[in-house]
Amino acid sequence: MNPEYQDMFAPLTLKNGIELKNRLVMAPMTNSSSNNDGTVSDEEVDYYARRSKGVSMVITATTYVTPNGKGFPNQFAADRDAMIPSLSKLAKRIQGEGAKAILQIFHAGKMSPIDLVPDGDVVSASDVPADREGAAKPRTLREEEVEEIIEAFGETTRRAIEAGYDGVEIHGANGYLIQQFFSPHSNLREDKFGGSLEKRMTFPLAIIDKVQRVVKEHADESFIVGYRFSPEEPETPGITMDETLHFVDVLADKELDYLHVSLMDFFSKPRRGVEDLDKTRIAHLLETIGDRVPLIGVGSIYTAEDAKLAFNTGIPLLALGRELIIDPDWVQKVAEGREDEIVTEIDKEKQEELVVPGPLWNNIINTPGWFPGV
Ligand SMILES: Cc1cc2nc3c(=O)[nH]c(=O)nc-3n(C[C@H](O)[C@H](O)[C@H](O)COP(=O)(O)O)c2cc1C
């Protein structure tokens, strides 16, 4: 291995005592390739196995905790016990290749397509439609329904434990229900779940508490609980960097095993809300978090050099998303001093060799600008 890159292969021990073999993880990526009954497909399992050899943790595509939380066609399900064998199959293949298997859990809220949820009943914190063409006006969740969804995050965590996962990641990012509750754009509630910044934290914090209680009850302390968030929203009003730093300050004391920021560009800078707009979002976050909990950074890391520059910021863990689709051997190549052989653009002729399920492959090659090489 090139000594310049050896730090990213240093093990990291999480708060719960679990050792990660290196600092590189697979980012959660929805693949829309599960079976129609909500079970994971063989194609999908093979896709994960192909990418689980080098990284220390694989965070799965997000899965939904209630039927009305489904966000994508052919997304795999974790909203009922009947899905446990299917979930287990995926965990075992990931672990069989040497990585920890982390199940990402979510509720899509108003981002659910109307035809994917029972009775077309799309729900959210308030009745503010998503900022996209043709978005349905969601129905405001009643307080008791909010409590039921919090319970459902606990139930899905229990299923993840029974299915043999090493942990769960609570998906509070990318505009889905948890973020909708934290957002002043989406959450206009006047009950205990809305209003001030503190009150908008109530739903995410209640989910974390619930998940942690379930873990205490059903798993041993080695079970990992992570939390993912998006730092800013473009809308006004919308989540600002300043609000996120307040939130992250609270999250850092929640005894989570890691935090995970969702970014498309690791080195991106805040839009607004902090005095120093020249400092990257990651730098602001690391300053607030200190050494209380490890942060996973992510976003457009394609080469070993990109990763080195990212680690130079002090980030303890780095997630690779698109790059692991483009080159499933990225981590092994760096480990073996073959970083020059890393492929950084998708080769449109190599679906089979890259082991990418059909629906995901079609999304990639039909969406210009999304993946380098398309
Ligand atoms: C195909 C695809 C699907 C994604 N699905 C999810 C998801 O299910 N959950 C999530 O938190 N982020 C999801 N993301 C965001 C990624 O986790 C990651 O933050 C983003 O791709 C930037 O990292 P990258 O430049 O390494 O790809 C997805 C991204 C892609 C490209």
Image (cartoon, helix red, strand yellow):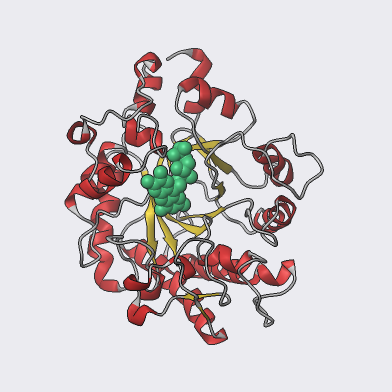
Quadrant containing the C terminus in the rendered view: top left
Q: Residue at x 52, y 55 (%)?
A: 174
x, y (%) of residue 260? 55, 48
x, y (%) of residue 55? 39, 35
Q: Nearer the viewer, residue 20 or 342?
A: 342
Q: Does the image show residue 322?
A: yes
x, y (%) of residue 232? 64, 52
x, y (%) of residue 247? 69, 58
Q: Residue at x 62, y 47 (%)?
A: 293
The correct choice, above or below, for 333 with respect to 110 in the image is above
The correct choice, above or below, for 359 with respect to 118 in the image is above
Q: Nearer the viewer, residue 183 or 88?
A: 183
Can you name the residue that lies furthest to the right here?
Answer: 275
Quadrant containing the N terminus in the rendered view: top left
Q: Nearer the viewer, residue 157 or 42?
A: 42
Label count reads: 0
The correct choice, above or below, for 322 with respect to 161 in the image is above
The correct choice, above or below, for 225 with respect to 303 in the image is below
Q: Nearer the viewer, residue 363 or 218?
A: 363
Q: Does the image show residue 58?
A: no
Left or right, 169 with respect to 241, comes to: left
Left or right, 130 with respect to 285, comes to: left
